[in-house]
Image (cartoon, rainbow, N blue to C red):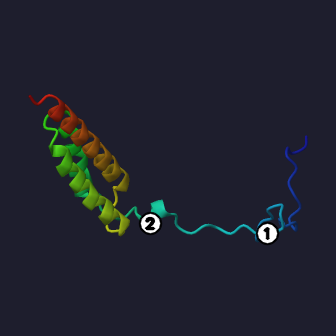
Amino acid sequence: MTDFPPTPPADSTPEPAAWPPPTGQGLPVYPVAATPADATAGLPFSKLAIAGFVVSCVSIFIFGWLGVLGALFSARAIGAARRGLVRGRGLAIAGFVIGVVGFVAYAIIFLTHQR
């Protein structure tokens, strides 16, 4: 019986891979350095972003004027995230938008029902 698969001869070595690998357009592809998401992985999450989001969400259901406070917290968190001090920029933006919308809705309802 024969061995399956056949064993290669002992003196054959695999061909080295070409570096840089071909791309089809004649330009080499090099490994990419750290992405922005990797750069922020070690940063702490912004407590102001969390507070701004929570206060803004509460302002929709309970006290509409709290939307201003939530928007202020979130604006400070956006600035800190933009400077690269903390993570949580998306949460801060969401808190800012919810706070502003909540306060504007509260103001419209409050002003239209005053008599």
- Residue shown at 83% from the left, 65% from the top: 14
Of all residues, the one furthest to the left in this rendering is 115
Amino acid on which disc 1 is placed = Leu
- Residue shown at 25% from the left, 45% from the top: 99
Please state if 27 lies on the left or on the right of 56 as rendered. right
Amino acid on which disc 2 is placed = Ala
Per the image, the residue denoted by label 1 is 27
Position of 109 relative to 5 (above/below): above
**Residue count near mark 1 (Cα–Cα under 10 Å), binned few <14, some 14–19, many ≥20:** few
Please state if 3 lies on the left or on the right of 81 as rendered. right
**Residue count near mark 2 (Cα–Cα under 10 Å), binned few <14, some 14–19, many ≥20:** few
Quarter of the figure with the N terminus: top right
- Residue shown at 24% from the left, 40% from the top: 104
Per the image, the residue denoted by label 2 is 39
Coordinates of residue 40 in the picture (x, y in percent)? 40, 63
Please state if 83 lies on the left or on the right of 53 as rendered. right
Coordinates of residue 73 in the picture (x, y in percent)? 22, 55
Between 97 and 25, the residue placed more toward the observer is: 97
Of all residues, the one furthest to the front in this rendering is 115
Position of 45 relative to 94 (above/below): below
Q: Quadrant of residue 16?
A: bottom right
Q: Secondary structure at mark 2?
A: helix
